[in-house]
Image (spheres, rainbow, N blue to C red):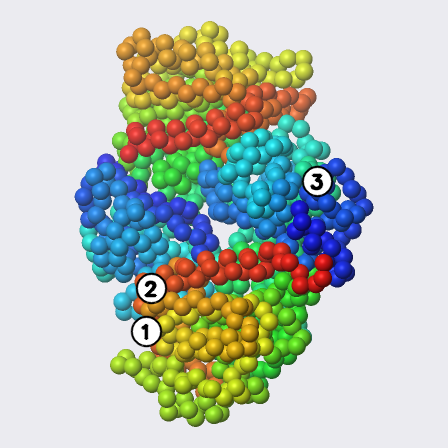
């Protein structure tokens, strides 16, 4: 530590104006073991740390490499990531590092020894983001506007601290942008043929293979996964089917049926920039039922199916061959979710095959293309395991096991989404008349690993069957 | 409703800083298929710039620009960044053009496309197999851009994101005048608070003698900024900017740069003369300026032979800071290499040669800029004092010049890191 000591002495001798005397000599000031009188080693005498990241503007599923240099050797530092969601909530994460003998740390090489994650994981600060203490409960991070990036500020702090401590120990900072959309991707609102959705087209003329993107009973129109697919060269249609103001009928029930989804598939087939015989379907949660149901409709021939943590049946609705779906059942009724006395909502009962009306179950045996099922083994909200077991069994029985790929991830919860975004273990389901929460499950590090691995496998699967 | 699959073109990363590399890959082609990779940029001046390379896909139907050989085009061989540095104006464009970004808060948008077959012209009239735009930025997110208009000094200050304080840089371009911000924006993206200084605006400062005080004031504006480390400020110059840098380092008693990066310049500036106008030199210029077979103006001979009389040049023996000279041996505008030799000789006799580092690049011209920007052998130039329009020959050949830009930038950043970021053992007693 001689070098640091020398600098501090000369600083005292030259009485440089930039000194910030630090009265608090906490145990966190491990940085400068021979610090003189609690004076911070950060002085204006030519010693300034440099924090760099590459790429600073990246897609959400791209890794960022963050490095610190020109620090004292064997020095304790903390990296903090902070961002505001579109709703204005503060999300943050942090990690503790010790610089090497050359005064550097690299997130691609070094271990975090404390904080939001442990070990070597260059993206830990991103998937490890959590709502800051004091923020509202039950938050979930989901990008509504995909045409702008998340702006994440990375700060380098002295010592091993938490983000809550004294802000003025910030040594360096940089700003990164995290995008769901690559330059040139086109976002097209779809309000035709009764459909409510958003189509994302890759740049260029095409024609492109395509995906139909279906989400869960949360409803609304979720665009970010489609935007990413288009950034990876696939045309992708995010489809709303429930809980959207542009859909017909009362918003608290599902008013569309099989023909709606078939129309969506046809829209892709008929699009001049889409390869009609290279269309896949991806469904998450209740979207799995919709995916399987659509795939087994006559006249619909997808090239591949991807199912994430969802049911094979729709427990409360009769199968309709060709109706408009106006069967008047109320989706918000307790028939499809249960609630315990702590206010925790679960769909386990509704999504369990043994509780499904037999005629509401999809004829899985009719699936005629490769099917990948991604299961989070810590899914606390849906009976994913029972469903995937049933699918596997059914396909085995009819000699179609070669079509089936099952990925199961220990410690992963229900919300397996594109990588490097935080998992929500529990989120707010409803506010009135009383607050209810859903336990989605998923232990953060394992869930993050599952997202990264499954995303790669999803893209490989699409590459294999759609190109 | 087509049934055929198109090739997949990917550019990674899609958004990058201008000095970052990218990987351009085409997949899903038929094997052994001839294709042309093409880059197109529509400049702020409304010209089309393009580059292209001819490739043949491998047995898997893949072309990877970083790994495969271009068989022809504006560049050949294995050149990961050839699609950028070999750009030139589309045939039929105006002549003597130079590509310089003025608006640094937005990126350059380069369209990378792949065409079937080996084609060399008419790209915009054909349909590519696939096309992807990519953004090239001079400015990282979070960099602050501040317009400076104080104490008579004009320029733009770029400050890196974060609390600082940061090492500072005074950034000066050449005799063309005006205000170019892009290098400072890029330097700020690498952690330096950099002031792009306007010290010449044709029509505005043309007859005033630019005095040393102007530059000292600019230096102090940087020094006084709360986010700048006051004794870690360097000077970065190109061409006339280098002359100023060397002059300040040797002569100024008011400012102490910690180091200087001097590109394509010289020390042949006699004290007491105006920076932009030297009557004796003007007379000589009329006699010694040359024009090549294309009628491009060559000015390198104007300052040759290097004078032995000390009053004709800056006394570099007085320089007390580290200095890096970066020159091209094909510089047709100034005799940079000869001047560098003379500087070395003077500093050897003055006992401060240990402060000097010189990089000289073969077949490289005058305009050594950040990497992957196109090379310009000769461009339009308006002589600030006389307003005459000439085409100035800068020199250099595209490939060696581009290699020089890439290599020198890396070395310049390492040099600045070493002198402005590392803690140096203070000369004070310990």
Neighbourhood count class around disc 1 (C-alpha, 10 Å): few under 14, some 14–19, many 20 upward: few
Relative to B339, residue A339 above or below: above
Query: Would residue A129 be found to the left or right of residue B305 on screen?
Result: right
Same chain under badges 1 and 2? The reply is yes
Q: Nearer the viewer, residue B132 or B72?
A: B72
Q: Nearer the viewer, residue A43 or B383?
A: A43
Precedes in sequence: disc 1 or disc 2: 1
**Mark 1 or mark 3, whichever is nearer to me:** 3
Mark 1 residue element: loop
Relative to B62, residue B200 above or below: below
Rendered residue at 49%/19% (across/down): A410
Mark 1 and mark 3: Cα distance apart in space? 62 Å
Q: Chain of mark 2?
A: B
**Tag 2 residue:** B400
Relative to B134, residue B296 above or below: below
**Tag 3 residue:** A30
Q: Nearer the viewer, residue A421 or A257?
A: A421
Query: What percent of the width, then of the height, locates residue B204?
Result: 55, 81
Neighbourhood count class around disc 3 (C-alpha, 10 Å): few under 14, some 14–19, many 20 upward: some
Q: Chain of mark 1?
A: B
Residue A111 makes an appearance in the image? yes
Residue B42 makes an appearance in the image? no
**Tag 1 residue:** B95
Query: What percent of the width, then of the height, locates residue A323?
Result: 39, 20
Query: Would residue A202 be found to the left or right of residue B139 on screen?
Result: left
- Mark 1 and mark 2 residues within 8 Å of each other at the beta carbon: no
- Mark 2 and mark 3 residues within 8 Å of each other at the beta carbon: no
Q: Chain of mark 3?
A: A
Rendered residue at 55%/58% (across/down): B418
């Amino acid at each position: 530590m001689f070098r640091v000591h020398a600098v501090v002495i000369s600083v005292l001798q030259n009485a440089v104006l930039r000194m910030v005397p630090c009265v608090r000599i906490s145990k966190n000031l491990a940085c400068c073991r021979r610090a003189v009188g609690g004076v911070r080693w950060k002085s204006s005498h030519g010693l300034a740390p440099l924090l760099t990241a590459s790429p600073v503007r990246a897609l959400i599923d791209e890794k960022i490499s963050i490095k610190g240099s020109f620090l004292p050797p064997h020095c304790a530092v903390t990296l903090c990531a902070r961002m505001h969601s579109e709703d204005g909530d503060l999300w943050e994460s942090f990690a503790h590092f010790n610089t090497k003998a050359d005064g550097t740390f690299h997130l691609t090489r070094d271990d975090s020894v404390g904080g939001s994650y442990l070990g070597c994981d260059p993206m830990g600060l991103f998937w490890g983001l959590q709502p800051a203490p004091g923020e509202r409960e039950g938050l979930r991070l989901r990008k509504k506007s995909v045409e702008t990036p998340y702006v994440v500020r990375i700060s380098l702090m002295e010592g091993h601290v938490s983000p809550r401590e004294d802000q003025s120990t910030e040594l360096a900072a940089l700003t990164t942008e995290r995008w769901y959309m690559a330059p040139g991707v086109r976002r097209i609102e779809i309000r035709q043929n009764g459909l409510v959705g958003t189509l994302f087209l890759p740049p260029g003329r095409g024609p492109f293979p395509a995906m139909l993107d279906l989400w869960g009973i949360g409803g609304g129109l979720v665009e970010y996964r489609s935007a990413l697919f288009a950034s990876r060269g696939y045309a992708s249609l995010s489809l709303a089917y429930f809980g959207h103001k542009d859909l017909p009928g009362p918003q608290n029930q599902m008013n569309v049926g099989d023909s709606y989804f078939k129309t969506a598939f046809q829209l892709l087939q008929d699009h001049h920039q889409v390869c009609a015989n290279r269309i896949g379907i991806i469904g998450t949660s209740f979207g799995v039922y919709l995916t399987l149901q659509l795939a087994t409709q006559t006249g619909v021939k997808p090239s591949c199916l991807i199912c994430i943590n969802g049911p094979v049946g729709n427990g409360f609705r009769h199968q309709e061959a060709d109706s408009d779906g106006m069967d008047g059942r109320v989706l918000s009724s307790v028939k499809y979710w249960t609630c315990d006395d702590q206010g925790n909502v679960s769909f386990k009962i509704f999504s369990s095959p043994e509780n499904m009306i037999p005629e509401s179950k999809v004829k899985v045996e009719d699936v005629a293309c490769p099917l990948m099922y991604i299961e989070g083994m810590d899914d606390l909200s849906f009976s994913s395991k029972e469903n995937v077991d049933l699918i596997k069994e059914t396909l085995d029985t009819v000699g179609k096991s070669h079509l089936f790929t099952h990925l199961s991830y220990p410690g992963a919860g229900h919300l397996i989404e594109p990588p490097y975004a935080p998992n929500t273990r529990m989120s707010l389901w409803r506010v009135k008349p009383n607050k209810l929460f859903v336990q989605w499950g998923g232990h953060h590090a394992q869930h993050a690993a599952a997202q990264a691995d499954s995303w790669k496998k999803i893209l490989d699967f699409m590459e294999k069957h759609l190109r | 409703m087509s049934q055929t699959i198109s090739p997949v073109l990917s550019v990674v990363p899609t958004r990058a800083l201008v000095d970052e590399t990218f990987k351009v890959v085409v997949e899903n082609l038929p094997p052994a298929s001839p294709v042309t990779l093409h880059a197109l940029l529509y400049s702020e001046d409304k010209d089309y710039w393009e580059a292209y390379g001819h490739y043949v896909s491998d047995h898997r139907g893949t072309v990877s620009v970083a790994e495969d050989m271009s068989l022809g085009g504006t560049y050949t061989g294995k050149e990961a960044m050839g699609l950028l540095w070999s750009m030139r104006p589309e045939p039929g464009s105006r002549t003597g053009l130079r590509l310089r970004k003025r608006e640094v808060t937005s990126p350059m948008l380069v369209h990378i496309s792949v065409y079937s077959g080996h084609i060399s012209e008419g790209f915009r009239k054909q349909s590519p197999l696939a096309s992807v735009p990519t953004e090239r930025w001079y400015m990282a997110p979070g960099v602050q851009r501040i317009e400076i208009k104080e104490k008579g000094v004009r320029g733009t200050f770029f400050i890196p994101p974060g609390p600082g304080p940061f090492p500072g840089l005074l950034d000066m371009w050449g005799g063309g005048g005006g205000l170019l911000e892009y290098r400072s924006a890029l330097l700020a993206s690498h952690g330096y608070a950099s002031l792009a200084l306007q010290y010449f605006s044709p029509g505005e400062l043309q007859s005033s003698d630019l005095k040393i005080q102007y530059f000292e004031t600019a230096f102090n504006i940087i020094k006084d900024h709360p986010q700048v480390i006051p004794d870690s400020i360097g000077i970065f110059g190109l061409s006339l900017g280098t002359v100023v840098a060397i002059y300040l380092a040797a002569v100024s008693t008011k400012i102490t740069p910690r180091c200087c990066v001097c590109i394509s310049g010289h020390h042949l500036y006699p004290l007491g003369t105006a920076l932009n106008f030297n009557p004796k030199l003007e007379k000589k210029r009329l006699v010694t300026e040359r024009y090549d077979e294309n009628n491009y103006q060559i000015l390198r001979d104007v300052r040759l032979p290097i004078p032995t009389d000390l009053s004709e040049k800056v006394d570099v023996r007085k320089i007390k800071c580290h200095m890096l000279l970066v020159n091209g041996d094909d510089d047709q505008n100034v005799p940079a290499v000869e001047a560098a030799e003379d500087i070395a000789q003077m500093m050897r006799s003055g006992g401060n040669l240990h402060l000097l580092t010189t990089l000289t690049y073969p077949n490289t011209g005058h305009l050594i800029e950040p990497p992957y920007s196109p090379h310009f052998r000769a461009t339009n130039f308006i002589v600030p004092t006389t307003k005459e329009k000439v085409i100035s020959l800068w020199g250099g050949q595209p490939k060696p010049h581009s290699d020089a830009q890439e290599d020198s930038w890396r070395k310049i950043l390492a040099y600045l890191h070493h002198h402005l970021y590392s803690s140096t053992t203070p000369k004070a007693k310990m």
